[in-house]
Image (cartoon, helix red, strand yellow):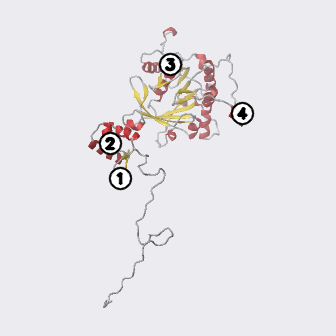
Amino acid sequence: MNSSDKPSHLHLVRGDAVHAPDLSSTPPAPFRTSWTADELMAMTFPEPKYAVPGILAEGLSLLAGPPKVGKSWLSLSTAIAVAAGTKALGSIPVEPGPVLYLALEDTPRRLQNRMAKILHGQPAPAQLTLATSCPTLPNGGAEHIARWLERNVGARLVVIDVFAKVRGTTPPGLSAYDADYAAMGYAKRLADTFGVAVVLVHHVRKMGSDDFLEQVSGTNGLAGAADSTLVLKRARGTADGVLHITGRDVEEAEHALSFQSDTGTWHLLDGPPEDHQLGETRTAIVRYLRSNPNSPPKDIAEAIGLSRDTVKRTCARMATDGQVGVDAAGRYRLPGTESPGSVPGVPAVPVPPLTSTNATDLRGQSTLPAVPAVPAKENDPS
């Protein structure tokens, strides 16, 4: 296949675009890193730029997940959406701009096949540059990416899949935490200097954890150096995946996702992940209680169009499973919702039963009348 026969949807990076610096380019202006307090407070900063609003902001993001969970499909489809200016995750409009995608575990043929599936007959975005090799960041990789960013003013996204391929060797004498933090520093400087979203695709630990940040493979130095951390996990039930997000410029959130196998894309689902991990009846009950807490089964049944007996039995099972709470009057609410008459954050104080030994007035004196002595009966044999 000659260059004129190259498929239109496979725009491989030129040899000089990543593997050799462009010495003719003008070096970027010095990046200021210090101010006096009054100077800083007098400055006006633009709002953070988002490659994907609410998901990926400018800065360094770490996208982690187990092997074969779909991280590469997610990152590649997002790169295509941003380069084309279409919709990321099937529903989030994004602004178009140049994108660099380093598919360091793929061959050109596999990358072509994946792109053809994602594009699904749509034209390939000319603003997407792809490469299947790159030097490690400490050994020239960061410089080569910087040269690409200089030539592509207004770039919106750089994806490195996977981070381990460009991390480089650990300098001697560093602790594991310091080594992880230092390795992230090269990508962090690129993101900050050029005001672009840089995504490092990474893995999670084999052992699970309740805290999704602790699932990221390596030390806390990785998540600590990143501006945002995203963890993609497969979820049980009807939702194919859950994307956990936390960061400095994005709100901590959990998003339910569905994987579309025919197009190789992840789609954002409405509502929290819990809604998609329940059956239809339980989902309808949860959604109603979210807006109408402390409701009896009769009201729930009328609102969602099911029989009262069905709702009553389902609510009872949900209460047993810890999915809803119920008060003494048989009214149901979601966990964390206060029942009527309660004071948030103030636990009820148990009142002991009134007895002759603990009943006192406000002055600490007994409020019970003294028990008169029972007079002995005449001729009492005692």
Query: Which tag, 1 or 4, sits closer to the chain's start?
Result: 4
Judged by depth in the image, the label closer to the viewer, 1 or 2, is 2
Q: Amino acid at mark 3?
A: Ala
Q: Amino acid at mark 2?
A: Asp
Judged by depth in the image, the label closer to the viewer, 4 or 3, is 4
Judged by depth in the image, the label closer to the viewer, 2 or 4, is 2
Disc 1 residue crowd, few under 14, some 14–19, many 20+, Cα 10 Å: few
Give me the residue at 41% from left, 46% from top: 335
Q: Could you say which is closer to the camera, residue 100 or residue 202?
A: 100
Is 73 rendered above or below residue 271? above
Disc 3 residue crowd, few under 14, some 14–19, many 20+, Cα 10 Å: many
Judged by depth in the image, the label closer to the viewer, 1 or 4, is 1
Q: Which mark is residue 299?
A: 2
Query: Which tag, 4 or 3, sits closer to the chain's start?
Result: 4
Judged by depth in the image, the label closer to the viewer, 2 or 3, is 2
Disc 4 residue crowd, few under 14, some 14–19, many 20+, Cα 10 Å: few
Residue 356: x %, y % from top left:
41, 72
Separation of residues labelled 2 and 4 (CA atoms): 59 Å
Give me the residue at 62% from left, 39% from top: 178
Separation of residues labelled 1 and 4 (CA atoms): 60 Å
Residue at numbered disc 3: 84
Q: Could you say which is closer to the camera, residue 173 or residue 295?
A: 295
Q: Amino acid at mark 1?
A: Ala
The quadrant of the image that shows the C terminus is bottom left
Separation of residues labelled 2 and 3 (CA atoms): 48 Å
Is 287 rendered above or below residue 70? below
Is 197 rendered above or below residue 284? above
Residue 355: x %, y % from top left:
41, 70
Residue at numbered disc 4: 39
Q: Which mark is residue 328?
A: 1
Q: Quadrant of residue 172?
A: top right
Is 315 placed left or right of 86 in the picture? left
